[in-house]
Image: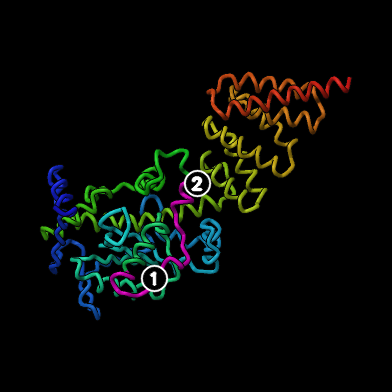
Amino acid sequence: MDEGKRLQQRLQRIGRKKPTRTPQLEKTRRDVSISHPGEHLDTPHGPAFIVETQYPGTHVHGSNPLSSLKHFESRSAAEIAVDPSLEGLSLDSLVFLDTETTGLAGGAGTVVFLVGIGKFVEGEFWLRQYFLRDLGEEQAMLHAIECDLEFSAGFVTFNGRTFDVPLLEMRFTLGMRKRFPLTEWPHLDLLYPARRLWRRELPDCRLNTIESEVLRVHRSGDDVPGELIPGLYLDYLRTGDSMSMERVIYHNAMDILSLVMLTVEVLGRHGTKAFSNLSASEALGVARWHQGAGRSGPAELAYRAAIESDDPIVRLDALRHHTAYLKRLGRRDQALEGWELWHTLKPDDPRPCIELAMYYEWHLKDLDMGITWTEIGLTCLSTWPDDWRSNEMSKDLQHRISRLKRKLANRS
């Protein structure tokens, strides 16, 4: 018996079966009967299906009208996104983009079946939603989207830099056999500044959480949880029942409108000079943003607003970052009060004690106070878990005490 047959018999004995192919979904063109005024678009690749809705600038989503965006400049967006290509553009030239897909894993098997594109046109907000009625219409849908994006300058998304835009670009490569370099366009991805502002005070920084807690948007019962959408679309392809797709289209529309208002909130909080109007978490996020941009004045004002917080966790975080910032600037005398307050608020933390010990030893030449703070630091360290970090810190403090006592003896 040859080796191949023996291997086959062994696989059969352990229950290994011949792999089967996953059956392909049927590509049958469907008519989508939905409450939205959808229409067919003729393209060189066949018909595409689009749902178009126009909102006046006075339309209120959450607590503000959509037209609130006109009060901001793209220069702020460029700084917040750390994308210089945004500077000089009009915010009206950017499109608000959100997609719905057959999965979140990415890769060539993930299909974009709904693309929402929102933009301001002569004071109104136009929302176009391109829906893939069946997989055979992908080329037509992509062609229509390409025409829609022709005069756009860049994107506003929520996590679109790593998901929506690269995936849409890949679908152009696979479905149209052409390169449409969307990932090179100017891009304001709101996920990162949203995390900067709210990760300390919200349970998570998902769009629907920010929407309800910050934007004060409450969706109707027509909505559907985002995690169910891929399965609902696959069910639609198998059954042809489009009722659930109405809810998906509503979900996508709400996401786009929330992107507009989230842009207003993010730009407004980063651009404010009244830091006392921000929550402590927001003030700390804005402080670190100003610090990264080299604006020491606004950074310190925002830090001080965060330090006055009633939230002890945010307050300690603000003290830690602020004192480190002052130390980096060589302003240790101004950091002294912060280190002392840090120790008062968290007396079992050795880190402010170490900073104080170094300050008294090297800058005030007060060896006695240096020894005092080092000993306090060792006492604090005794409450920490016994691991490599605390061991290294203990060695450093023991070495510091020995050095200080030698210096004090030599001085005597």
Placement of 153 over or under 292, stated as above or below:
below
Question: Where is residue 309 shown, x and y percent of the image?
Answer: 55, 34
Mark 2, secondary structure of its residue: helix
Instruction: Tell me how the rendering is colored.
Output: rainbow
Q: In this view, does 38 lie to the left or right of 120?
A: left
Q: Which amino acid does label 1 sit on?
A: Val
* Residue 251 on the magenta segment: no
Q: In this view, does 159 lie above or below 310?
A: below
Q: Where is residue 354 in the image (x, y as percent from the top left)?
A: 68, 28
Q: How far apart are marks 2 and 1 (CA)?
A: 31 Å
How crowded pointer 1 is (Cα within 10 Å; few <14, some 14-19, many 20+) is rated as few
Q: Which residue lies furthest to the right in this view?
A: 412
Question: Which dot marks residue 196?
Answer: 2
Q: Magenta region: which residues?
A: 172-195
State if disc 1 and disc 2 touch (CB < 8 Å): no
Judged left or right of residue 367, residue 134 is: left
